[in-house]
Image (cartoon, helix red, strand yellow):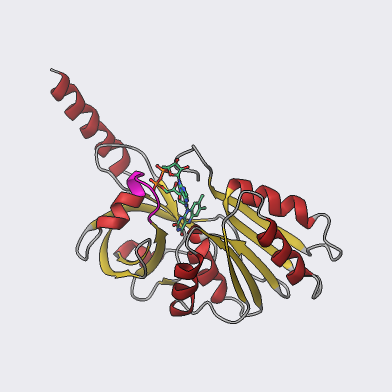
Amino acid sequence: MGTSVTALTERLADLATGAWLDTARVTGVSRLSPELVRVELTADAFRKATWVPGSKIQFRPRRGTMALRTYTPVAWDTERGVTELVAFTHGDGPAAEWFRQVSVGDPCELFGPRRSIDLREPGGPVIFVGDESSVALACALHTVTDDVTHVFEAGDPAGLADVLPVLGIAGRVAVVPKTADRADLLRRAREAAAAGPATLVVTGDAATVHAVRRDSRGWPRAPRQVKGKAYWAAGRTGLD
Ligand SMILES: Cc1cc2nc3c(=O)[nH]c(=O)nc-3n(C[C@H](O)[C@H](O)[C@H](O)COP(=O)(O)OP(=O)(O)OC[C@H]3O[C@@H](n4cnc5c(N)ncnc54)[C@H](O)[C@@H]3O)c2cc1C
């Protein structure tokens, strides 16, 4: 009885969610490090999409549930119907698990792209602050401008610093260890701001986004504009 109710619930979740999700195929997987993976997705539906750098897709990592997880396309090729994601496989959430096990030929149920951060026309230099979950956004920004100073925090700074150039993120890049007070991260961002008014783009850990936003209010040269978004928060699942 219990099993059949569960099976029915899963079937209903599949029907309800499947009606508004597109199915893409995984056409490429590249393990960039033990914790970062780049995945290429191909779908006919992608040919009709309108992509804005910084926008998001949402996908269903587990059939039989309605839980969605949010990721950032690195770029979008409408002619070929192809996009790419870069995922941080931290922890044992459903998305991290999906990305850890993904292989070429797998289906991926998703919808999007939909607006999130809009990186078009950053209007001058950009200070980009983020973490491992923000790497794809840095790549998306790279399609718009190279005038960027990056400051990343990471659990494994050396590992992330090795991966970034492979993705074309080079030049003004600092990767600092993640610490509770974020002192080094805030100092580096403030130093970058001393060069002149810039657009601040900050994503990743909700607590970091909050701390950087607050600190930027005291910068001698205030940011021209702030584009900030929490990508995840300790103890919370599936932020959108
Ligand atoms: C607009 C938007 C765009 C995003 N783009 C990307 C992207 O391109 N690449 C990417 O890797 N992530 C991205 N994220 C973050 C990603 O959606 C979350 O990390 C998501 O929670 C992962 O799902 P999960 O099923 O693995 O873990 P969940 O089930 O959501 O969470 C399980 C546990 O892991 C913790 N957790 C979740 N993410 C992290 C993390 N990054 N570091 C440490 N602990 C974490 C949670 O607090 C929770 O305790 C984006 C988020 C948003 C809102």
Q: Residue 15 occupies which quadrant of the picture? A: top left
114 vs 36, nearest the viewer: 36
Residue 23 in view of the camera: no
Residue 151 x %, y %? 62, 67
Residue occupying the point 51% across, 71% down: 139
Q: Is residue 92 magenta?
A: yes
Q: Is residue 225 left or right of residue 85?
A: right
Residue 93 x %, y %? 36, 44
Residue 61 x %, y %? 31, 48
Q: Residue 175 occupies which quadrant of the picture? A: bottom right
Residue 19 versus residue 22 in the image, above or below: above
Prevalent SS, magenta region: loop
Residue 40 in view of the camera: yes
Residue 207 x %, y %? 62, 46
Residue occupying the point 44% across, 51% down: 70
Quadrant in the picture for the N terminus: top left
- Tag count in the figure? 0
Residue occupying the point 21% across, 66% down: 104
Q: Is residue 167 left or right of residue 80?
A: right
Residues shaded magenta: 89-95
Q: Residue 174 occupies which quadrant of the picture? A: bottom right
119 vs 205, nearest the viewer: 205
Q: Is residue 93 left or right of residue 224?
A: left
34 vs 105, nearest the viewer: 34
Residue 158 versus residue 202 in the image, above or below: below
Query: Outermost residue, top direction?
Result: 1
Residue 45 versus residue 5 in the image, above or below: below
